[in-house]
Amino acid sequence: MATVSLRFPPSAGHVRTARLVAVSVARRLGLDEARLDEVRLAVGEVCARAVRRCAAGDVTADVTLEVDDLGPSLSVAVTDQAGRVPEDRDEAVALALIRGLADEVRVEGGPGGPGGRVWLTWHREPG
């Protein structure tokens, strides 16, 4: 395949669609059911986090999901346009959950500011 990109308004109603897209690509890569569940949960959580960040920053610009299955891994990037938003308990819980599900997690600055881009990676084989 290649990179699949999906842009959606920062609304909770679109998180399910983003999750389905990521899982479809992961399935084509050959990840097993347990790993697909990890992808499903983590992508849903990181997209919901982006929606919450946009709401907190009063941002209406689209959230972008990019899923890439080229190479030995599944890579997912979720980018929001929110600037610096106050970190709260939900943010800490979301990041802890995501880190427990993906093989690799990076939180970086996005177009709007700190924390606006989250990269997730799953290797074909766990570990």
Image: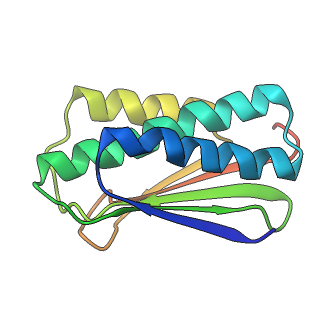
Q: Which residue is drawn at 16% across and 59% down?
A: 59
Q: Which residue is drawn at 13% across and 46% down?
A: 56
Q: Is residue 119 left or right of residue 63?
A: right
Residue 3 falls in image quadrant: bottom right
| Residue at the left extreme, as displayed | 58
Q: In this view, does 32 lie to the left or right of 117?
A: right
| Nearer-the-camera pick, 109 or 52 | 52
Q: In this view, does 63 lie to the left or right of 85?
A: right
Q: Which residue is drawn at 41% across and 45% down?
A: 14
Q: Which residue is drawn at 83% across and 37% down?
A: 126
| Nearer-the-camera pick, 21 or 46 | 21
Q: Position of residue 52 (x, y in %)?
A: 25, 42
Tell me which colouring the rendered structure shows. Answer: rainbow
| Nearer-the-camera pick, 16 or 114 | 16
Residue 20 falls in image quadrant: top right
Quadrant in the picture for the C terminus: top right
Quadrant in the picture for the N terminus: bottom right
